[in-house]
Image: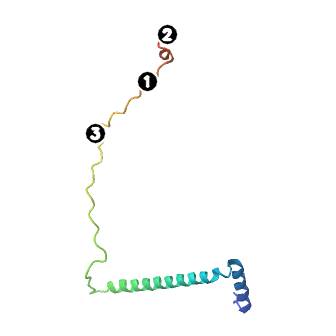
Amino acid sequence: MPSLGGWEFVILIGILVLLFGAKRLPDMARSIGQSARVFKGEMKGMKDDGAQKDGAQTPGAQKDEPATPPPAPLPPAQPAPSATQPAPPAAQPEPAPTPGQAHNGSAQ
C-alpha cells in the first residue's frame, strides 16, 4: 500500500475544503478530537474495570459490600380466571325483521 506524501495531503485538504467549506472544518476537527478523548477515556475505564475484576477474584479478597443490591421482592400475583368459572353471557342481538314484518302486515 503506497504511503501518502506531501502533495497527496495538499490535494486531500483541498478536496475537504471544497466539500465542506472552510467554516465547518475546524468544528469537524474539534468534534473528532472530543470523540477521540471520550473513546480513550472509555478504554481506560474498561482496563481499570478489568484490573479490579481480576483483583477481586484472587483468593483471600474480601467484599465489604455487594456490588449491586438484591432485587426487590415481586408483588403478589393476582389469580387468573379459571376455566371452571362461566363466562359472562354475551348480549344477544335482536333478530332482523323479515320483509313481511317490515310492512306490519298491511299487504294482506
Q: Mark 1 points at which residue?
A: 95
Q: Measure the alpha-carbon separation of dots 3 and 1.
A: 29 Å
Please tell me the numbered disc located at residue 47.
Answer: none
Viewer-proximal residue, 27 or 5? 27
What residue is rendered at 27% in x and 54% in y? 77
Q: Name the residue under label 2.
A: 106
Res 93 → quadrant: top left
Are circles 3 and 2 on residues that touch, CB within 8 Å? no
Mark 1 or mark 2, whichever is nearer to me? 2
Q: Which amino acid does label 2 sit on?
A: Ser
Mark 3 or mark 1, whichever is nearer to me? 1
What residue is rendered at 70% in x and 82% in y? 17
Res 87 → quadrant: top left
Residue positioned most to the front: 23
Viewer-proximal residue, 59 or 29? 29
What residue is rendered at 49% in x and 10% in y? 106
Are circles 3 and 1 on residues that touch, CB within 8 Å? no
Mark 3 or 1, nearer chain start: 3
Q: Measure the alpha-carbon separation of dots 1 and 2.
A: 21 Å
**How dense is the environment of label 1, judged by Cα within 10 Å: few (below 14), some, or many (20 and up)?**
few
Are circles 1 and 2 on residues that touch, CB within 8 Å? no
Q: In this view, does 99 lie above or below 47?
A: above
